[in-house]
Amino acid sequence: MKLKKLEGLLGDLDQFSDPKVELEQYPTGPHVASRLIYTAENSFGDITGKVVADFGCGCATLGIASALMEAEHVIGIDIDSQSLDIASTNAEDMEVNIDLMLSDIKGLNWRGPLVDTVVMNPPFGTRNEGIDMEFLKTALKVASRAVYSLHKTTTREHIKRVAIRDFNVKKAEVLCELRFDVPRLYKFHRKKSVDIAVDLWRFVP
């Protein structure tokens, strides 16, 4: 599937109806999501025919993109049941199969590599400090091929240092820098939308 078609399909997905600030719920827009999944497949072959887990899947934009790129099996995991309801509807509308699981990523008791690839847009850690690294730590334990993750560009050096020093990754590289559009979802937001610079990382466990 071509990038433009993938982005167009993802633009039709429903997003959070009642986002929860404590979970840092922000939709992964079609521009960012399509490029993450398209790059993972076309540059590295990490999606098509692979078992893919979407950590903190929310409304399952990344998981659905993986299914549209012909992943063998997709698992979406989130702590919020309302988000999973939207994810289920989105998957039905797109006519793709995704297994959805209600779970806290920190409490995920999987043992050893159980999936090929993890894709995720974790919380940035502005409300819950360190949660982004908890996501990454768990993802690296369960993925056999690669972890694709979005993190603020301002945290680049910290992410790389911790991944190599504490998580023993074989490789940690920034594939590109993207503009993440954060819409006005919460009362403390003053602007209609804000662009945040994020890095698309590929980690090899």
Image (cartoon, grey):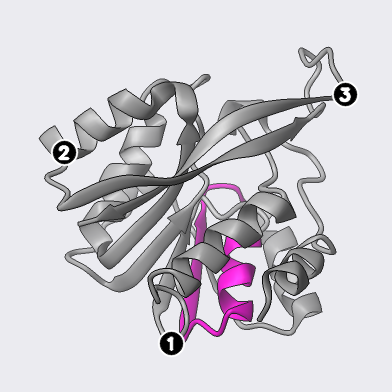
On the image, the x and y values in percent for residue 4 come to 75, 68
Q: Which mark is residue 192?
A: 3
- The residue range painted magenta reads 60-82
On the image, the x and y values in percent for residue 194 come to 75, 24
Sequence-wise, the earlier of marks 1 and 2 is 1
Q: How many marks?
A: 3
Q: Residue at x 26, y 46 (%)?
A: 172
Q: Residue at x 48, y 52 (%)?
A: 120
**Circle 1: is it few (<14), some (14-19), or many (20+) Cα within 10 Å?**
some
**Circle 3: is it few (<14), some (14-19), or many (20+) Cα within 10 Å?**
few
Residue pointed to by mark 2: 164
Q: Is residue 74 magenta?
A: yes
Is 5 drawn above or below residue 190 in the view shown? below
Are the residues tagged 3 and 2 within 8 Å (C-beta)?
no
Q: Residue at x 78, y 16 (%)?
A: 189
Q: CA distance from mark 3 to mark 1?
A: 40 Å
What amino acid is found at the position of numbered circle 1 in the picture? Gly
What amino acid is found at the position of numbered circle 3 in the picture? Lys
On the image, the x and y values in percent for residue 108 come to 32, 54
